[in-house]
Amino acid sequence: MMHRLLIIPLFIFSSLVTPQQRIDLSMQKEIEHAIIRGLEYLHDQQDKNGSWQQHTAITGLVLSSFLRAHPAISEQDSIIARGFNFLKSCIHDNGGIYNDDMQTYSTSICIMAFKDADNFLYDPIIRNAQSFIISMQKSEENDVPPDSINYGGVSYGKDDKPCNLSNLQWALEAVASEEQAPDDTLHLNLAEKKFEEKRTLFFDRAIQFLQRCQNLKAYNDQSCSVDDGGFMYSPGTSKAGETHSYGSMTYAGLKSFIHASVSRSDPRVQAALEWLQKHYTVKENPAMGMQGLYYYYHTMAKALSVADIDVITTAKQKNHYWRHELADQLLQIQNADGSWVNSNGRWWENNPVLVTAYVVLSLEQVLEPFNTSSLLPDQR
């Protein structure tokens, strides 16, 4: 048991709050309390084998939600150790980490959990898993030509379904590395240099797939583009119908471009931002309503954070401090037991464990600029 480690304050906050962030100390404490309650709920849902719901991806998301909460939460806690033992038991000879047919999806999420553990002993696991993800990309190396709509995408693995942006956005986040100074590559050994070359190609090819998911005629070579700057699920296909752009995929596209080192000033990024400005809301998943709502929140928080955006200005010149508004919305809809759940069950969102992990990670992202926990002794 964790011996109720979660009752300790999760963060030490700075008293200085910028106008852009618009979250005062009182709201910070409310968010902190909501995170604690969410983690306590997740704590009680762990299965005997260390997993959450016998699922690698859900287990990975829950582990990340704990590890990103506070430096004092680490593998020294038995709940975390047992979770990682389960993930280790799901590692395959090809480097993938999965126990179902969604091989790359699960592996990508598990990579992020192992990264969050901040344990150098996991470096080989992470590198092998990233190599597996890279190997699953559709390209000339597995006989997929550049004119294929799947080119640059990442398949789920076992099946032969068309690639999609949702799976790719997890893969790009998992394969992304900490930014290195240019000279750092001079100190890499031959194997490391080859891996970096493959990583670079992976992102270059992914950009081609991203362009074909974006409704932007100047860059999308498919006739399906409707030219509004938003994103669809896969080239020529949208969960919102026809090729319509929608909220969660547009945030996924924005985040993916940033991870692929596309500049924020790039026209593709600017077009996505303009779509998001026009359709900004924390009440629903734009063009999808309640479907995939919590996935939307999670992707929104990550995308705007990685894009370094604190304020969204709508067409009517109204400033929206998204961290405050998203947190306020999530605080209002937390259940009495500390969980969150979607009444609309599409994409597993009637599963409170999955949805609670999404929300805890979103709230931790909201608080990230205020997190000064590095002032605490590192207990990892």
Image: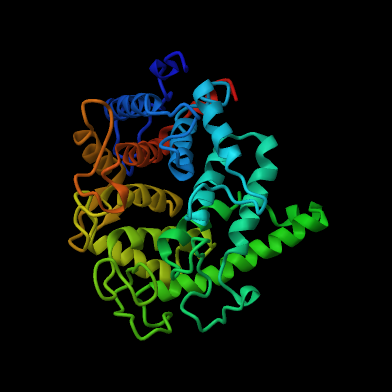
Viewer can see residue 309 = no
Left-right relation of 112 to 313: right
Q: Quadrant of the C terminus?
A: top right
Left-right relation of 147 to 164: right
Q: Nearer the viewer, residue 371 or 117?
A: 117
Q: Quadrant of residue 376?
A: top right
Number of numbered discs on residues: 0
Question: Measured along the vertical axis of the image, is residue 8 above or below residue 29?
Answer: above
Whole-percent x, y for residue 114 in the image = 58, 39
Q: Report the colour scheme.
A: rainbow
Whole-percent x, y for residue 113 in the image = 53, 40
Viewer can see residue 137 = yes
Q: Nearer the viewer, residue 310 or 129?
A: 129
Q: Residue at x 26, y 57 (%)?
A: 313
Residue farthest to the top, as pictured? 3
Q: Residue at x 40, y 82 (%)?
A: 218
Residue farthest to the bottom, as pictured? 223
Question: Measured along the vertical axis of the image, is residue 268 above or below residue 298?
Answer: below
Whole-percent x, y for residue 299 in the image = 37, 51
Q: Nearer the viewer, residue 299 or 110?
A: 110
Q: Residue at x 53, y 21 (%)?
A: 77
Whole-percent x, y for residue 199 in the image = 64, 61
